Image (cartoon, helix red, strand yellow):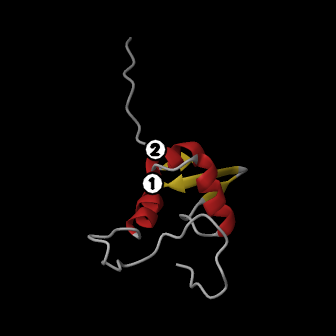
Amino acid sequence: MTHSKAHVTPSYLRTPDAAVHLGLSARTLEKHRCYGTGPVYRKLGGRIVYAICDLEAWAQLGTRRSTSDPGQGTVHPAKRLSSDVVRR
C-alpha cells in the first residue's frame, strides 16, 4: 500500500517563518509585537502565530506608488509610538 503525501499550505506561521515571509528579522517582528506596531497575531496555548492574511494586510499598509504618494496607511518602525501618533 502506498501513501501519498498531500501538500498542506499553512494558514498560520510562527514568528521566524512570519518574519521571513515579510522580509524582516524575527527580532524586529518581536519588537513590533511588543510595541503594538506590527501585524495582528494570535496566541494559541503558549505559541505566537500569525495568519498569513494578517501579515499581507499589514504589509499592504506600506504600499506606495511614488515618494509623494501618502498611501492608505502607515507601517510604523518597530519602536514605541509617541502618544500623539494614532495607531492603525
Q: Say if mark 1 contacts mark 2, CB within 8 Å.
A: yes
Residue 1 x, y percent position in the rendering? 38, 11
Of the two numbered discs 1 and 2 in the rendering, the one whose residue sits closer to the viewer: 1
| In the depicted structure, whether residue 13 falls above or below residue 40 | above
Dividing the picture into quadrants, the one containing residue 41 is: bottom right
Given the current orientation, which residue lies at the most extreme top position?
A: 1
Callout 1: few (<14), some (14-19), or many (20+) C-alpha neighbours within 10 Å? some
| In the depicted structure, whether residue 46 falls above or below residue 60 | above
Position of 2 compared to 11: left or right? left
User: What residue is drawn where x is 40% and y is 68%?
Assistant: 62
Q: Nearer the viewer, residue 57 or 62?
A: 62
Given the current orientation, which residue lies at the most extreme front position?
A: 67
Given the current orientation, which residue lies at the most extreme right position?
A: 46
Amino acid on which disc 1 is placed: Ile
| In the depicted structure, whether residue 9 falls above or below residue 76 | above
Residue, disc 1: 52
CA separation in Å, label 1 and label 2 = 8 Å
User: What residue is drawn where x is 61% and y is 59%?
Assistant: 42
Dividing the picture into quadrants, the one containing residue 50 is: bottom right
Dividing the picture into quadrants, the one containing residue 7 is: top left
Element type where label 2 sits in the image: loop
Residue 10 x, y percent position in the rendering? 46, 44
Residue, disc 2: 10
Amino acid on which disc 2 is placed: Pro
Callout 2: few (<14), some (14-19), or many (20+) C-alpha neighbours within 10 Å? few
